[in-house]
Amino acid sequence: MILKMEDKMKASKFHGQGLNCAECVIKAYNEEHGTDIPVAIGSGLGGGNAVGSLCGAVNAANIIIGYLKGRENGLEANIAKPCVKKAMDSIDERYGTAICLELKEDKNSCDEIIDFAYDNLKNVMDNK
C-alpha cells in the first residue's frame, strides 16, 4: 500500500487505541510497509522499558532496523549498527536525549515522540 503525502502514517494514532509507544511504531511500520514484525516484541518497551530509560518508540525503531537490516552471523557486515547510530543521532539532535523520563520532564508528548521516532525510522531506512 502506497500512501499519498496527505495520508502520511501517524504512528501515534495507535496510541489512542491502547498500544504503547513501541507497539505503535511497530504496528505503523507493518501497516505502511506490509511487514509482519510481531507487535508483541514492543509490549515490554513502553514507558522507557517500563522504568523510564530508553524511550520505547526509539527502542522499537532500533529493533525494526535490526530485524530488517541485521545479520545472521559474525561473518556478515553489520549494516544495522550504523543505521541505528544514524537514528539515535537524529533523536539526540532533536531532543537532546532518548531517555523517557527526560523526554517527559522536558514536556515532550508521547504522541510527538512516537511520530518523530517513526518518521526518523523511515528516513533512516530510505536513506541507508
Image: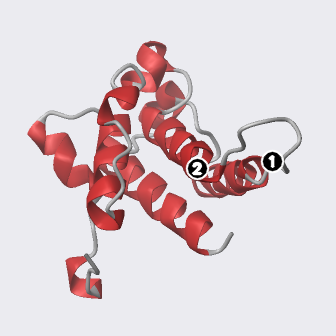
State the residue in front, 109 or 66.
Answer: 66
Q: Horizontally, is 46 left or right of 120 in the view? A: left
**Gap in Å between the C-alphas at discs 1 and 2?**
11 Å
Question: Where residue 66 sits in the image (x, y, percent)?
Answer: 61, 44
Label 2 crowding class (10 Å Cα cut-off): few <14, some 14-19, many 20+? Answer: many
- Depicted 63 relative to depicted 7: above or below: above
Please say whether residue 100 is visible from this viewpoint.
yes
Residue pointed to by mark 1: 78
- Depicted 91 relative to depicted 23: above or below: below
Residue pointed to by mark 2: 65
Instruction: Please state which amino acid type lies under the numbered disc 2.
Output: Ile
- Depicted 121 relative to depicted 24: above or below: below
Quarter of the image with the N terminus is: bottom left
Question: Where residue 41 sits in the image (x, y, percent)?
Answer: 40, 28
Identify the residue at image location x=20%, y=42%. Answer: 15
Please say whether residue 109 is visible from this viewpoint.
no
Quarter of the image with the C terminus is: bottom right
Image quadrant in which you'd find residue 29: bottom left
* Secondary structure of residue under mark 1: loop
